[in-house]
Amino acid sequence: MNTARPVHWPMNQFPIVDDCLQVGGISLRQLAARVGQTPFYAYDRRLIDERVAWLRRVLPPTLKLHYAIKANPMPALVQHLAWQVDGLDVASLGEMQVALDAGMNPAHISFAGPGKRPSELAAAIAAGITIHLESARELETIARIGVEQGQQPRIAVRVNPDFELKTSGMKMGGGSKPFGIDAEQVPALLRRIGELSLDFQGFHLFTGSQNLRAETLIEAHNRIFELALRLADDAPGRMWLLNIGGGFGIPYFPGDQPLNVQPIAANLQRWLPLIADRLPEAEVVLELGRYLVGEAGIYVAEVVDRKVSRGQTFLITNGGLHQHLAASGNFGQVIRKNYPVVVGNRVMGTEREVVTVVGPLCTPLDVLADRMDLAKTEIGDLIVVFQSGAYGLTASPTAFLSHPLCPEVLV
């Protein structure tokens, strides 16, 4: 019987020279000196470029690729991506401003999310951004603001599907959800859109995020396309947009395997001619966030102390859950699992040890690595958390215990 414990998928996207990680062609030690402080986040633009280029080669050429800014809204990163993707998707006024500042055509920016404030809706309407409807009340607010501005708001209906995929990492559709309009309520809403003479663009359907199983995403796309074609019969005008969401996952934890995109692409290639036949003007959009940037980022913290407590060695760093909540296991994990972690300036090391890496916060939740085998460290060594390019800094409680803010760099 095989009793081997699962291990992390190899993190070989960053080169190693003289046992030191290289980010953007720069050694980690040199990069830390350039940043001027630790902790920090670093994102490698080469890896982002390679991921986008690879997707362009694999996916059907008529499929549009959007970046979901919520994954990482760093302005320099968004600006870098804006010229490589076909659109940007935002979830707040702040993200909207980042998208506009990046130079993206407002017609290719969409605004989704429940609870949009009237001021946010007004800004989106004034900019000519497509608003993804989340409720019937939001529709009436949009119509009123459009009349006040003398504008015809661009809207799409975010549909909460009448099915749920049990294997999604984080379910965003199906069952009772705060997101979107229940599929059975959509026809009545479409009639109301027609009465209000708004600029109807199409549908946004999304079932869940962080999927590592191709068969799950294939099933999702099959059911999304079937539902969209059914709902299109009640559309108040031509369909210009069909946003099928994203959900492509990346390997974080021991035993995770990378997503096999090829069968997903083949299934999309099968569907797109059928969609083009029924909805000839509609652009089909794949909206990705984590999959574009997650593996291109690292979080770097410095070892400031080490201690042994009843036989267990602890490395104390100057960074922790206040800057990387997900790595601590407190961002959706039920059972805490380790992100891939190395000592960045001693990736292999001549000696190894089993240690627990913790941050400086006064809480037992502040753990970056629990009983992991790492190179033996000294004070001043740099702990690196891989897979940190998405849902890192901005998904963390940065004000907790009032530690200094953490810089981000794109290299």
Image: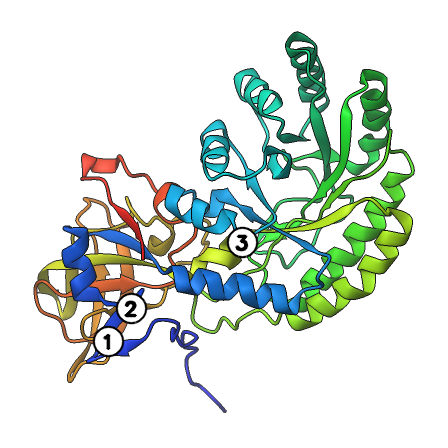
Q: Which mark is residue 25?
A: 2
Q: Quadrant of residue 297?
A: bottom left
Q: Residue at x 48, y 51 (%)?
A: 81
Vertical comparison of 316 with 103: above or below = below
Q: CA distance from mark 3 to mark 2?
A: 21 Å
Q: Position of residue 92 (x, y in %)?
A: 50, 31
Q: Position of residue 221 (x, y in %)?
A: 74, 56
In the image, 257 versus 75, the foreground residue is: 75
Amino acid marked by disc 3: Gln
Is 276 on the left or on the right of 330, as rendered?
A: right
Helix or strand or loop: what does disc 2 sit on? Answer: loop
Query: Contact (CB < 8 A) between labels 3 and 1?
Result: no
Vertical comparison of 30 with 66: above or below = below
Amino acid marked by disc 2: Gly
Q: Which mark is residue 396?
A: none
Q: Which mark is residue 347?
A: 1
Q: Residue at x 86, y 40 (%)?
A: 231
N-term-proximal mark, 2 vs 1:
2
